[in-house]
Structures are given as structure tokens and as C-alpha cells.
Image: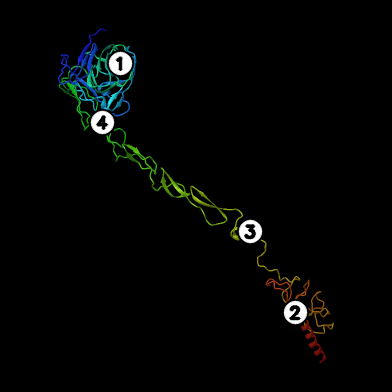
Amino acid sequence: MNFPLRVLTLGSASCLAYFACVGLAYAGTLSAQGAVSVINNTNQMQGVVGTGDFNEGNAGGVPANVYAGQGMTWRSGQLTAILPGCETPGSGTIPSYQTNGAYFPGPIAGGGVANGTFAYHAGVVTFDQAITQVGLVASRNGTQYLTAWDTNGNMLGQVKWVPANDAAFIGIDTNGVPVGMVAYGNDDLWGGGTYNIGGSTIISDSWQWAVGTPCVNANDCMDDNNPCTAPPQCVQGACVHTPDDNGVCPDDGESCTFDECQDGLCVHPNNPDGECPDDGNECTNDMCQDGACAHPNNNNPCDDMDACTENDACGGGSCNGDDIVCMDNNLCTVAACDPMIGCEFNWQMGCCITDEDCADGEVCLLGSNSCIPDPNPGDGDGDTGDGDGDGDGDGDGDTGDGDGDGDTGDGDGDPGDGDGDGDGDTTGGNEGGDDETGGGTSTGTGVNTFGGGDEVGDEGCNCSTDSRGAGALFGLLGLALLGTIRRRRDDE
């Protein structure tokens, strides 16, 4: 393609008749190559349908469809894939937000404006309508190109910007041919270069795109789908989108921010009094901090649901308590703690405190606190007599003479006991005929007449036997005295 080269030296006395050059402050130069024209002032944009100043963000990548509501979309990938029919090598990428006013020293020529955030590595775009004019504020860094293709993929031409340490509004006009794709960068694509994002010259701000003919009324303007601008108006042949701070800004989904319009942009300033959702942890506070929901730890009282702890309190974002001490001061129990019910005291088998803790026939041995067999089994009254007169004591203390009459001269001449031996005992049964002592049926050693016997009946007390000898002596003296009395009676 052999198209004439049109060069515009800005800031000089000469300029194209098509443009109004009053007030220009260009130090650099603009030139057009191919079937396109240079646009050097924002007022030359006719029928503007969209603008992008990048102030909707301040970091990260620019959303590809951030300006899709105004008909423009950012593209990435091979140029040949973005626009069918294009044969230009190279690929584009999605730009990113940057802030550095030094790239756009004032005053910016051509009515350009660069405030706040700008686009870095921007970029390749396509449009969803017949756009014939595209312009932007180019930075002071290096030689830059704005190249356009038609909808069939044919390259129409490019505008070249060579700054002189200044920034300016530069634009390309395809002279009524609808644009299929536009690329901005530092590669001379008209000269056969390959497009890429290398270098630091792809820095721009305040893009505009227009149909190339002036609007007559608002019906010729497209809504920018920005909730923070008023419906478009046609002002002096250009579509204008006036900021509307009363617009309804979409909720960003963050409860810790406000959603409001400021200067035509939807912004989300911090809301420190916002309601932060509960995270379900009683040991954290749910609150807004720096526009986001935060959950700092607290030291509130709490319940760790453990019956084996006490003094529960929050610390480090969790509920913890002090271990309780299970103690019942009982030697026979083992203490344990169940988290569900608390202290338990389990009795040790074989251990005792009193006899009642032992089985029948056992007693508690203090000191070892163990149950042992009872060393004194029985009826528990300590008596050894049975009072049955079976030879171990009948408990009546009587003496007998065999006939029960106490008389002398019972046939054997002895004072008597009925057995003629004069010893007063009752052994041998009824030796004196029908005389009786006691019941006459005693066996064994006989009855101790003087109460000195070893054994007693049921009412006995286990008395000691250390006075037995004295009792016998007094018995003999009694018998002798009785015999003397009887003899005297006989003599009389």
C-alpha cells in the first residue's frame, strides 16, 4: 500500500487546515502513515460514544470488559486470532492500572487530561459498532504508534507520536472506514514490525472513541451504562456523560464498605460501623477494619464444654479452662474425671474403712485398709458356758447327800452324800438309794458346791479360778463342823 505520508509538526506556525491549532502546546511531532489522518485535539473527536480514564481502579489488571458498556473491549492473544483476516504478527495483553504523574508532565497538549490512574501496557481493543475515530493521551516515554485495521483485517494505517519530553492527546481518524481493531504500542507495525508489550512506552490515559460524525441530539449518543453518570447529552456535536453523584452504585458485596457515586465513578469507602458476619467463634470479635471484615481475638469468659475444667476464658482465639482437682479424701476410692459429667470416685475392690465395707465373715484391718477373715467367728457374746448340766456345770451350786434330806446316819455312818465315802461329791449317780443331789443325772466331774467351778451356764461371765483352793478349805471346815453337831445330838 502506497499512501502519502502526512506529517504535522505541532507547536509550529504551520498546521493542517482541517484542525484548529489555537492554543496547542505540542513540543513533539505527530505523523500519519497510510489511509488515516492525525487527530491532535479532543475537540476533533466527532460523535464520541465512549471514554475510559482508568480511575475506576488503582492496582491490578484492567478488566477486559470495563468499558464494554460503551462499545469497547480489551483484547489479549495473537492479533491474527483477535481479528480474522489480520496478518500482522504479535500478540496483545490486558493492561494494568498504574499511578505516576511524572509520565504526563503538564500542560498536556491537545486538550488531553491525565489524572489519577492510567493504563500500563495498553493495549489492543475492538468495538461493537462502527467507530472511525480513536484517541488517547500518550506519555512522554519514547516513540509510540496508534495503528488501525478495518473489519476485514486489513491494516488501514497508523499515527506516530515522537514526544519531546512532553505528553499530548493523539488520535487516528480512518476517514469514515469502520475500525475492526486498534493497537497502541511502541512497535512500527506499518513498517513490518511485530506487536508486543516490550519496553516502557505503552503508557496512556483518557481514551476516547467516536463515530466520526457530530451528534445532532441525545438520540445519537449511546448510554455508557455507568450508574454514576447522567443519561448522555449532545453538546456541540459531542456526546457528554455528566457525573451524577446521586446515582445508585452497585453493591460490591462487602458489608464493611459504602457503595456510592463520586465524580462519575462508583467508589466503596470504608464503613467502620458495618455489620460483619459472625464467624461462629465466641473467642473472636466480628468487626469491620479497613473496609474488610476482621475477627480479632478476645479474652471473654466462655464455656469449653468440658466438665473437667473451670475458670474457662478465651485466649488465642480458643476457649480454654483450668483442670479441676478431683478429691474426696477417701483412701478406698480412685479419682477420675469424665469430660461429660465431671469427677468420678471409683471404689477399689478389697479396700475398707469400717467392717461394714467388708463381706460377711470378714472384718476391716485398719492400717492396711483391707478385709480379712474374722478371727473370732460365732455368736459374738464371748460366753463359753451352755448351762445344760452336761458335766461342765449346771450353775445351781447345791451339794447333795444322795437322799436329799440332809440327815446323818443314812446307813453308812458318814455325813452324807449317799455314797458312804464322806467326801460330799455326787459322782456315780444315786448311790444313796432315793436321795438326790441336783437332778441326779450329772456326769463328768460333778458340781462345785462352793461356786469355784471353771464353767458357768448361759448367764456366766468367764470368771477367773484363782480362789478355788480357799473355797475347798472352807467346805471341809463346814463338813467337820456339821459332823460335830450331829454327834452331839446323838449323844444326847
Residue 51, position as x, y percentages in the image: 23, 23
**Closer-to-camera residue (248/245):** 245
The circle drawn on residue 360 is 3
Residue tagged by mark 4? 266
Q: Nearer the viewer, mark 2 or mark 3?
A: 2
- In the displayed orientation, state which residue is furthest to the top: 2
Q: Earlier in the sequence, mark 2 or mark 3?
A: 3
Disc 3 secondary structure class: loop
> How far separated are the C-alphas under marks 4 and 3?
92 Å
Asked which secondary structure carries label 4, the reply is strand
Distance, label 1 to label 4, CA atoms, is 35 Å
**Element under label 2?**
helix
The residue that mark 2 highlights is 470
Location of the C terminus by quadrant is bottom right
Of the residues tagged 2 and 1, which is closer to the observer? 1
Side of 357 relative to 44 (left or right): right
Q: Earlier in the sequence, mark 2 or mark 1?
A: 1
**Which residue is painted at 20% across and 26% down in the image?**
241
Residue at the bottom extreme, as displayed: 492
Between the C-alphas of marks 1 and 3, the distance is: 110 Å
